[in-house]
Image (spheres, rainbow, N blue to C red):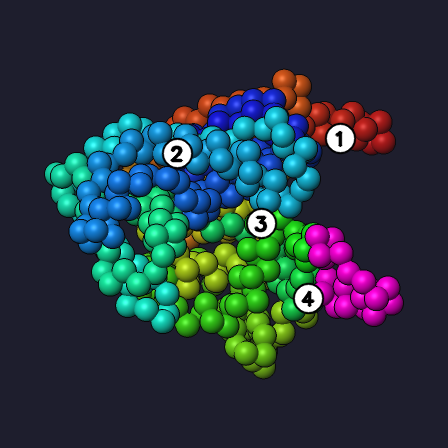
């Protein structure tokens, strides 16, 4: 799965190919957030945009015969159409910005042509009820080794236009469901979302402001009103706010990991270690429960009284325990946010365990500590290391096999401040080649040595 970018923020051009772990680095203001949020936005739009896959003859057959068959379309061409639609109309909404900022921007998604063959081996059935007050249903079926999609219309009591709209939307969902994963994002603004989510309903605030203005001016411009009612936050930030706002409902669900907790206990244990406790989400809010220590009372802290590091980890824990499905894409901006270097090392282990549990992970980072730990875990996957030596390291440092990751499962990129392009970094048995960080570390070390000799 590849994402191509042209003229997006600081970046003139570049390509990101997703791997099990995808790392994006770069100096400040080089477009890392533009890249990660665009990937999130495009994957989300793949499941919500509608394309005209069925024609008028298909719709007429549905109403006349109650059934029609559609040739399976080329998935690559569908993604090309979605990418164009996304770049032209939806990208500005992802960032909640003016159209002219992205008028020359292109963000596109492409996949291997073998996905077309994979879809023909795929069997699925989608039943869509068209309205609460009617028995009208669409039934969309694909069968293995067949080149058509079978559609049935049951009890057609709604208009052709409504059926057409629903069919186009649901066909895109059905066709892309086996090849386009669900995605979840954790932004660098997550600490604010976790603390102020109850106050961040900008639409409610806008409505109140407009009512006051109407009272003062005795008039209201409907277009200006609708513009002000739009949330001021980007789509990923709104998603984080919503995740917090509806967390008390989300915790009623179980992620794939929680449904098989015994098999994934290694993941939950590492999550508890990184957090230093656990979270409790109830109607009155979110509480942090630090791990109880001997001779100390049990403590429950409301989120607003917990540390910034604790706030930054809440959404990751919520995702792992209550949302995650095998095959998801998880996007995290600056996972190291507010964490001590030791906690960053622990977090790197948690991230690797998450990848080894079946989640594709995209991270943007400035952290040398995080990447060095990831590199160590990549090196530990080397099959040439003697098993006894590896087991000794595992025992001495509290590691397990699920903490290691082979280099072929990692892609790493840097946004260059010189070329304004995305460059792929080498990844081998020694890990990610971190030239961006190594130069800064060496410069800092050399300066420190020179000054040390002057004062000693």
Front label number (4 vs 3): 4
Task: Give the numbered dot on residue 235.
Answer: 3
Q: Main secondary structure of the magenta part?
A: helix
Q: Residues within 10 Å of mark 4 (few under 14, many from 20)?
A: few
Residue sitting at the far left? 145
C-alpha gap between disc 1 and disc 2: 52 Å
**Mark 1 lies on residue:** 448
Sooner in the amino-acid sequence: mark 3 or mark 2: 2
C-alpha gap between disc 4 and disc 3: 17 Å
C-alpha gap between disc 3 and disc 1: 43 Å
**Mark 4 lies on residue:** 204
C-alpha gap between disc 4 and disc 1: 53 Å
Sooner in the amino-acid sequence: mark 1 or mark 2: 2
Quick check: can you spot residue 395? no
On the rendered image, what quadrant is the C terminus found in? top right
Element assignment for label 3: helix
Give, as a single range, the part of the protein colored magenta: 206-225
Element assignment for label 4: helix
Picture coordinates of residue 96 (x, y %)? Answer: 64, 46
């Amino acid at each position: 799965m590849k994402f191509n970018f042209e003229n997006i923020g600081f970046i003139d051009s570049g390509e990101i190919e997703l791997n099990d772990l995808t790392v994006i680095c770069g100096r400040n203001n080089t477009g890392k957030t533009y890249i990660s949020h665009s990937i999130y936005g495009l994957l989300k739009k793949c499941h919500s945009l509608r394309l005209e896959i069925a024609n008028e003859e298909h719709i007429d057959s549905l109403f006349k015969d109650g059934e029609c068959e559609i040739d399976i379309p080329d998935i690559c061409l569908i993604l090309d159409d979605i990418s164009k639609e996304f770049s032209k109309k939806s990208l500005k909404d992802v960032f909640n910005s003016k159209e002219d900022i992205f008028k020359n921007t292109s963000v596109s998604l492409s996949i291997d042509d073998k996905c077309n063959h994979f879809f023909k081996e795929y069997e699925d059935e989608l039943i869509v009820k068209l309205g609460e007050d009617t028995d009208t249903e669409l039934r969309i079926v694909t069968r293995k080794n067949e080149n058509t999609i079978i559609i049935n219309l049951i009890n057609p009591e709604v208009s052709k236009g409504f059926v057409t709209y629903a069919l186009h939307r649901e066909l895109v969902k059905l066709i892309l469901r086996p090849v386009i994963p669900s995605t979840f994002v954790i932004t660098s603004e997550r600490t604010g979302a976790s603390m102020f989510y109850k106050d961040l309903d900008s639409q409610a605030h806008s409505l109140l402001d407009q009512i006051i203005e109407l009272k003062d001016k005795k008039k209201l411009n409907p277009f200006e009103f609708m513009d002000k009612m739009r949330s001021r936050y980007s789509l990923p930030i709104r998603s984080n706010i919503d995740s917090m706002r509806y967390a008390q409902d989300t915790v009623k669900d179980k992620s794939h990991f929680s449904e098989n907790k015994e098999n994934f206990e290694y993941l939950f244990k590492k999550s508890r270690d990184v957090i230093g406790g656990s979270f409790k989400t109830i109607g009155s809010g979110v509480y942090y429960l630090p791990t109880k220590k001997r001779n100390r009372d049990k403590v429950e802290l409301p989120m607003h009284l917990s540390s910034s590091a604790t706030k930054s980890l809440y959404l990751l824990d919520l995702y792992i325990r209550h949302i995650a499905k095998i095959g998801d894409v998880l996007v995290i901006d600056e996972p190291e946010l507010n964490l001590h270097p030791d906690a960053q090392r622990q977090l790197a282990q948690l991230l690797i365990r998450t990848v080894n549990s079946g989640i594709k992970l995209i991270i943007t980072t400035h952290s040398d500590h995080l990447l060095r730990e990831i590199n160590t875990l990549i090196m530990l996957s080397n099959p040439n290391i003697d098993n006894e030596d590896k087991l000794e390291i595992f025992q001495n440092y509290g590691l397990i096999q699920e903490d290691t990751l082979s280099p072929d499962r990692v892609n790493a990129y840097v946004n260059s401040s010189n070329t304004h392009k995305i460059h792929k970094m080498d990844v081998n048995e020694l890990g990610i080649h971190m030239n961006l960080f190594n130069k800064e570390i060496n410069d800092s070390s050399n300066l420190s040595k020179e000054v040390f000799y002057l004062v000693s």
